[in-house]
Image: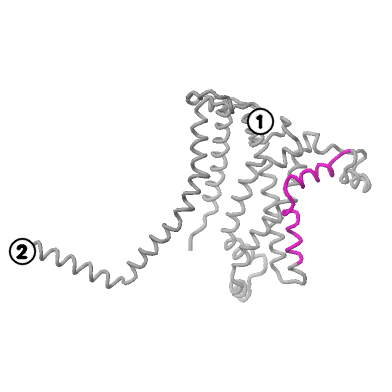
Amino acid sequence: MSQPIAETQRATATEVSNQRRPGATQRQQQTRLAWLLLLPTLAIVVFVALYPLAQTIYQSFTDARLASGVAPKFIGLQNYSDLVRDLDFRRSILVTLQFTLLTVVFEFLLGLGIALVINSAFKGRGVVRTAMLVPWAIPTVVSAQMWKWMYSDQYGVINDFLGRIGLIDQPIAFIAQPNTSLAAIAAVDIWKTTPFVALLLLAGLQVIPGEVYEAARIDGANAFQQFLRITMPLLRPAILVTLIFRTLDSLRVFDVFYVMFGARQDTQTMAIYNQQNIVSFSDLGYGSAISVAIFLIIGIFVVAYVTFLKVEEA
């Protein structure tokens, strides 16, 4: 008799618990429905992203050749061992990191300034917001070729302008000289992508309640104090997203470098060096190892941003 009594007590307790939480069953149903709706998206992500990543990791341990028709052989860590000793890859890492540092820092500072300006109320603000997106809307290949012509030491408008105002005595081959090529291409990316950074930061500024600034003014805080104590802390989620997006794009940059420099050895980024090994040299196994290394480098930056720019969930 004790077992039926115990089962009755448990059933009663469960019923009482459900009565105390009338929305529990409904929440569970909503959770199951949410996962059901997400399944197609998750399947696409697995097929488009995770499967190619797993395939690349596997190929990095083989001697696979592109379109060779020969079954690849497992060679263990040989590709990674060669990669560690590869001076050309080290140079490409240095070039990419220098480019990333230059572009991300200047784009963030300029983008933040632009976002603060266009976030204020002034006449013609809508026109300014639209106009600032023009450089970003131009395809990268087109803008890179345009700037390549502008940088020309024979017919470029930049040399002509600098000569007219007396800053230079003779034309400068900006993209040919090693001491100016990196700064020249960084300027192209800064010109093109700063509007995108400003747009992301502007979205973050517009969700900050105006009442917070009004209360700070009542308490006697000046504009600089409001910027440091209110704007920057509340803008941190937008800053995190912006830095991740721009750093990721800069670390895997390919098109603007390839248009302006081709496969020039002293200006090869990691992506161009990878493309050379896979496409030009048909070394799919070694190229896959380079791809994995690029993935890990990007992951290090993302983890660093998330760690240092701690964003608490609401």
300 displayed left or right of 222: left
Which quarter of the picture shows residue 280?
Answer: top right
Which quarter of the picture shows residue 91?
Answer: top right
Q: Position of residue 49 (x, y in %)?
A: 52, 44
Magenta run includes residue 135: yes
Distance Cα–Cα, label 1 vs label 2 = 80 Å
Q: Nearer the viewer, residue 82 or 275?
A: 275
Q: Nearer the viewer, residue 214 or 55?
A: 55
**What residue would you read off at disc 1?**
276
Instruction: Identify which amino acid the numbered label 2 is placed on.
Output: Met
Part of the protein shown in magenta: 127-153
Residue 93 in the image: above or below residue 203? above
Which quarter of the picture shows residue 66?
Answer: top right
Question: Tag 1's secondary structure?
Answer: helix
For the stretch drawn in magenta, the main secondary structure is helix
144 displayed left or right of 245: right
Question: Tag 2's secondary structure?
Answer: loop
Q: Position of residue 201 (x, y in %)?
A: 64, 60
At x 48%, y 37%, the residue is 54
Pointer 1 or 2: first along the chain: 2
**What residue would you read off at disc 2?**
1
Q: Position of residue 92 (x, y in %)?
A: 66, 33
At x 72%, y 39%, the residue is 257
Mark 1, Cα crowd under 10 Å, few <14 / some 14-19 / many 20+, is some
Number of numbered discs visible in the structure rendering: 2
158 displayed left or right of 211: right
Tags 1 and 2 touching, CB below 8 Å: no
Q: Which mark is residue 34?
A: none
Name the image quarter holding the N terminus: bottom left
Instruction: Identify which amino acid the numbered label 1 is placed on.
Output: Gln
**Figure colour scheme:** one colour
